[in-house]
Image (cartoon, rainbow, N blue to C red):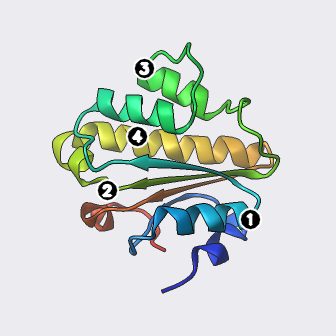
Amino acid sequence: MRALSELLSHKRDAGVYCVTHAYPVKEVEKAAKAADLAFFHIEGAKIEKKTQFLNHAALALHFPEYFGNNWDAFEDCLTDLSWVESETGYVIYFDHVDPLLEHAHSHFETLLELFTDAVEYWREQGRAMFVLIHGKGAKDLKLPSW
């Protein structure tokens, strides 16, 4: 098993990854902080619908009150994050993704597109964004694995 610190220390490798090991949240947070990256955790065990995901994500990423609770607003906030203190970048650990993947597959595909676009946006801004996706079904996604 490769250490997450190895991945997160290489900012140029920022991206959306399927993590094949169920890392404890505290371990991911510790690796993010060691790499000087802001850390966010989205617990997906009970998320089966788009609206549930958006609500959980808004709380986990500390979105402002004006968050519009739709994909456009999610993308806007994901590419803003001005309320987060980080000069170097971000780590989003979305684990237990299987309920959303199973019950709202098309929304999950949209979510992956938005995460990928946000990674590119932050790369252009000189910051790294790592999105770590974990769940049994995540291995079937066309994502690089770690």
Compared with 54, 138 (above or below) is below
Q: Amino acid at mark 4?
A: Leu
Instruction: Judge the density around disc 1: few (<14), some (14-19), many (≥20) Cα neighbours within 10 Å.
Output: many
Q: Earlier in the sequence, mark 3 or mark 1?
A: 1
The residue that mark 3 highlights is 69
Compared with 5, 102 (above or below) is above
Q: Earlier in the sequence, mark 2 or mark 3?
A: 3
The residue that mark 1 highlights is 35
The residue that mark 2 highlights is 96
Q: Residue at x 71, y 37 (%)?
A: 84
In front here: 82 or 111? 82
The residue that mark 4 highlights is 111
Q: Residue at x 31, y 62 (%)?
A: 135
Residue 128: x %, y % from top left: 70, 53
Residue 120: x %, y % from top left: 64, 46
Q: Residue at x 47, y 68 (%)?
A: 144
Instruction: Judge the density around disc 4: few (<14), some (14-19), many (≥20) Cα neighbours within 10 Å.
Output: some
